[in-house]
Amino acid sequence: MSYRYDPKSLIADEFINHEEIVACLQFADEHKNDRRMLDEILAKAEQRKGLSHKEAGVLLVCDDPEYVEKMYKLAEQIKKDFYGNRIVLFAPLYLSNYCVNGCVYCPYHGQNRNIPRKKLTQEEIRAEVVALQDMGHKRLAIESGEDPFNNPIEYILDSIKTIYSVKHKNGAIRRVNVNIAATTVENYRKLKEAGIGTYILFQETYHKESYLKLHPRGPKHDYNYHTEAMDRAMEGGIDDVGLGVLFGLELYRYELCGLLMHAEHLEAVHGVGPHTISFPRIKHADDIDPSAFDNSISDDIFAKIIAIVRIAVPYTGMIISTRESQEVRARALHLGISQISGASRTSVGGYTEEERPTDTEQFDVSDQRSLDEVIRWLIELGYVPSFCTACYRAGRTGDRFMELCKSKQIQNCCHPNALMTLKEFLVDYASEATRRAGDELIQKELPSIPQENVRRICAQHLEEIEKGGQRDFRF
């Protein structure tokens, strides 16, 4: 059966249309050296209104150093325009590695008899959350394998309730994002009622034929059900959703086109694009050898993809995890990344272990620094580390957040919120060296808050935090 391309359709084969992608790849090859077209695309990108998947595809194959440099400079400036120099911090929390799927790139696949299976009890979750709070984390992304018996939606909901309930010293988890398997509208409503932040689901690959081979068994084998999950999440009331592909499974040009088509589809149907886009690359883990996948991409191509997504979807949050090394992450920050994980442990129950456990890891962690080290590194690079969750708790989600971002009023709320949450970290958790560097940064950044009244109130709250009083001020 043939399908026509339609970004407003709710059928996966129509809004992620194979024939459309193939045609776009051919168009890009034909025009990659067309300087007039390249100039027009970049001029459009400078308007900060984004690019189509077709236009982005042309930029991706352009290898003229002059134009590539223009892309990189524009991506960095667009990120500064909408997100300033703030970088949001989070950590993943693995609840269970029980899984019935057969994903050939993931060690949690149901056929793996080597990996120990583990599911955290609610008491163990509390211990993990305390350990994360003792580091200074305020925002988590919970992860779980797909197993209707071991990991039903009730377990996920109970876990969210437990996480939010833990108040340890000055610590609290203020936002729980959820990365679990595609589910029903009813279950998405339950997640919304539980107070989740963003619902995250990686497509892994948009190439349907490859997808079916990579997911040979289990409920995840259903490409359309998986690909249409974000529409069900939106129907269930979740207006912040996060996209991503696992780069290295399929040809990266195809994946970028599919990823941007998905973003366009969400905008066309729901009036708001993805809240976040993540950039994982396949990594070694247990019985998974990344060299078995022949579509790996170089660091240079990876950087170019990040820059082009920032140009094409200027308002979205962009995430890079500890899968990547310190060097790769530093480069990515300049090209548009706005969120990173820190001190991550990708094993079930890993945060309460003194030594980093590897027996239940989903993937190898490249950046193994402590959160304090990551914070000081960001400060030294000139970024403001942020633990802010204010927009989510003030109801500024979905189109309301995007409107705030597009109007550039984000500087009058997100920037002071970032400074205040950084101050909390410095007072409650930081080493002496990090605290000195952070306090200097805060004094340098305060004058950049545009509205005088906001700036004055922020300064007052910073003093109150310093004195050890109230926490969780927010605009």
Image (cartoon, helix red, strand yellow):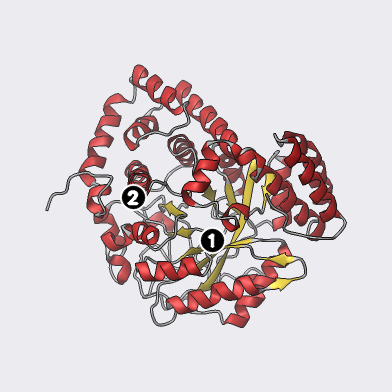
Q: In the rendered image, is residue 56 in sight?
A: yes
- Locate residue 467, reporting x and y percent: 88, 56
- Locate residue 326, reporting x and y percent: 62, 48
Q: Does 330 sit above or below residue 228?
A: above
Q: In the rendered image, is residue 183 in sight?
A: no
Q: Nearer the viewer, residue 51 or 253?
A: 51
Which residue is the site of mark 2? Answer: 250
* Residue at the left extreme of this rendering: 1
- Locate residue 285, reporting x and y percent: 48, 64
Q: Amino acid at mark 2?
A: Glu
Q: Nearer the viewer, residue 202 or 139?
A: 139
Q: CA distance from mark 2 to mark 1?
A: 20 Å
Which residue is the site of mark 1? Answer: 364
As helix, strand or loop, the secondary structure at mark 2 comes to loop
Residue 176 lies left or right of residue 287; in this view the side is right
Disc ID at residue 347? none
- Tell me which residue sits at (23%, 46%) in the image: 18
| Label 1 Cα crowd, 10 Å radius (few <14 / some 14-19 / many 20+) | some
* Residue at the top extreme of this rendering: 36
Q: Nearer the viewer, residue 63 or 183?
A: 183
Q: Amino acid at mark 1?
A: Asp
Label whose residue precedes the other's in the sequence (2 or 1)? 2
- Tell me which residue sits at (26%, 30%) in the image: 27
